Amino acid sequence: MNNPPTLPPLLVDNPRLDQWVSFPEPAHVRVSTGRVEIGQGVLTAMRQIAAEELDVAPERIGLQTGDTDLTPNEGYTAGSQSIQFGGVALRLVCAEVRGLFLDHAAAAFGFARADLAMKDGAITHRGMPTGHDYWSLAAAIDLARHASGRAPVKPASEHRVVGRSAARVDLAAKVFGMPIFVHDMAMDGMVHARIVRQPRRGATITAVDEAAIYRAAQKAGKGAIEILRDGNFLAITGADETTVEAVAAIAPGHVAWDGVDPINPAQEEARWLLQQPSIDRVVGAPPADPAPAATRREATYTRMHIAHASIAPSCAMALYEGGHLEVWTHTQGVYPLKAALARTLKLDPTAISVKHVQGPGCYGHNGADDAAADAAVIAVRKPGVPVRVRWRREEEFGFEPVSPAMVTTVHATLDGAGRPADWTTEIWSGRHSSRPGGGGNLLAAEALPDPPPAPPPTESSNPPGAGTRNGEPLYDFPAKRIHHHLIAETPVRTSSLRGLGATLNVFAIESFMDELALEAGEDPVAYRLAVLADQRARAVIEKVAEMSGWPLLNPPPQAGEGRVGASGPSAAGTVRGRGIAFARYKNLAAYAAIVAEVEIEETVRVTRVWCAADAGLVINPDGAKNQLEGGIVQAVSWALKEGVRLDTAGISSRDWESYPVLRFSEVPEIACELVSAVSDNPPLGIGEASGGPTVAAIGNAVAHALGARIRDLPLTRERVMAALLKA
Amino acid sequence: MQPVSLTVNGNAVSVSADADTPLLDVLRNHLGLVGTKFGCGAEQCGSCMVLIDGNPEKSCGKALSSVVGKAVLTIEGLGTREHPHPLQQAFLDEQAGQCGYCLSGILISAKALLDRNASPSRGEIAAALDDNICRCGSHPRILRAIERAALKMREGAGR
């Protein structure tokens, strides 16, 4: 792979080699990364990258991650960018460090540089030991110097660690039930805390019946509690978690609020967006002259708000001692959180340390930052006392930022061959990013006196976009544009969730492509390939077609080999179908093509999914497949089941019954293959690549099975029945 | 309050806590066994699954008083790094997990299944795990891992 002509931005921000790599003790290497483990396996991949370029055994590497005292500032671990950017920066640093040691050995000991090599940290001369290694020379080589970014990295053909599947560094602890999650931390003198949440931004407490809350605690009889109030921030603390949890469950009934206007529950369906004021922008091709009506086609696709629905509610620990605040959190960004906490608490940033500890699977901006702020706000009011906040399940569902409801309308003008000559993707959506970096969007900050102003409704419409993400099809249409309607006011707080706008935009684009192919009388694969020049895109589509035996339907999976829980051949009244979809995530990360097969008997079951993906240089093939598979399962869940429910008070789907997700017996059989897994193409982010195409492939499979198109997500029984009636 | 006696992972323990304290809280806060996880507190997600006298139960909904004199098995009692249970080894072999928060509960549910059915079909495994939520989408690997463990255990038993 070629060196980038300019220093990667992460090396501009964190220029010193010793910010990334050091040799603190014999036989061990310390590698620092600002990226954090959120369930995606990034630590394992980072260790492989460092081991490869340093030429040391992976086991020698200790990883230091996500710590504002210790690691580089890499912003957020988000957007499928950890390997594509963070990993590439680490690789350059490690290659440079290895080169410095070899240069030093050549100069100091009179070896020809070309005869030297590194083998598991030891320097060899023409293959023979020299007696020198990283550790013996560490004192002589000052790594407190700026990275040049020009050290040659290994070509893929020389890789021995990168490109080979590696076991996850964190899995054993999880399989043996070791304390690895922030939820598992315990400190001497710790108090548990729960928050009585402000129902809405701007809501104010008019009365707290503290006596009633204390009486409830006494009745529970398990230990003392304390009520902590500042402005509209209200918390219950105590040494006994059972008591605090029980009191927190009843406390909201003893607090009266003002400024809680009812919201309109009809806003749970996305089409209300079409009537909202919006900030409008057009990106891409200039407006086209109106085409004859006979050549114009359009269709509208929608989806509801989607919850992150992590398996556990958010949690954090904080301790304020001697004027210094330490916070342990499963945030995606320790540095941005630190800045936000400094503003919220009016503390100097140097008085705050934020440390990442693993949490439940993170798919975007969930409650983690808010829980950290809750713990910090309480901790600074209780110096010397470790404060553990763990949200309640209904709090996580009710107050985490959700992925906004969206409407996407695709407009196309067809040429004589029935292919788009002009294409507009028109998108209505609330914000997909409202992370707390600037200090605005933390629930605790909003509840305290002197709350920050509401974050301004800003979001770039330009690639790679957020709501507009993947709004531009990769297909070679003569004119393409995005028309973005950014909705400023949403009924509930919205922010990023895996895929952001790409999920609905890919669903819309790829559904519409199938609708146009049907009209043109062409096979969906052939129709796509006819308008797609990108060779890598073509390759994944052709590969997934081959894997799935396209265009034929496969026999229904049997119990034992096929889709789990399948009970045999299709019953009478069951229809089956298959669909294909493709996208390159953000049009700059990994390519993924998906074929889905479905079985419908009133409800949709996804029976099989095939996936072909091209992520360039893949660090850990098994890890990459794990991410693709996970994205597929999550997307099946989104497509079939998920939508946040609202009532006049806000989010009403506050448990797993009212917000169902895919269960084991509903999971399809999945086959994933990486195309050109070993190559000198740069690594491309893969964590979000399979979601949009999976949702779209399911939509196309359902249309194939029913002979009727459902354009609103999720694809529920009611919508299937309505589509059947229409067909 | 009267101390309550029960067996946890083969050890007799005595706990001083109110009778209605959830077993999950007892395990995590009184006994320091944090491998069993809080997920929902409403018996809906399976993160807190333990075996009580061999039956899979959600410990968030079990009062301490209901387990007096009973035998509780948690993830810590299933196996160790040095002596992993075949299920734990199979989860490592299949790399069956992402965030891993759900795995304790899933391993316990799987143990309960294999204890009563040494040769479960894929469908039976899935059905046995329908009380456990995994949000990361590790399901295909988890199902493979349980099949693998069952096979290993049958091979071991036949030797």
Image (spheres, helix red, strand yellow):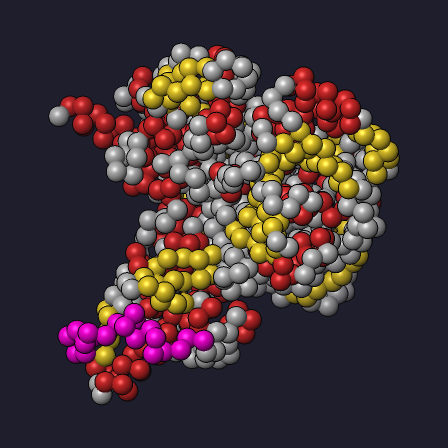
- Magenta residues, start to end: A124-144
Measured as percent of width and height from the top left, residue A218 is found at 68, 20
Measured as percent of width and height from the top left, residue A373 is found at 66, 47
Answer yes or no: is residue A423 visible: no
Measured as percent of width and height from the top left, residue A438 is found at 70, 58
Residue A350: quarter of image: bottom right
Specify whether A295 is left or right of A698: right
The residue positioned 32% from the left and 41% from the top of the image is B92
Answer yes or no: is residue B92 visible: yes
* Rendered-image quadrant of the C terminus of chain A: top right
In the figure, A711 relative to A249: above or below?
below
In the figure, A154 relative to A501: above or below?
below
The residue positioned 39% from the left and 35% from the top of the image is A177
Q: Nearer the viewer, residue A149 or A123?
A: A123
The residue positioned 35% from the left and 67% from the top of the image is A23
Q: Nearer the viewer, residue A279 or A99?
A: A99
Q: Is residue A125 magenta?
A: yes
Q: Is residue A570 magenta?
A: no
Residue A200: quarter of image: top right
Specify whether B149 is left or right of A243: left
The residue positioned 84% from the left and 38% from the top of the image is A204
* Rendered-image quadrant of the N terminus of chain A: bottom left
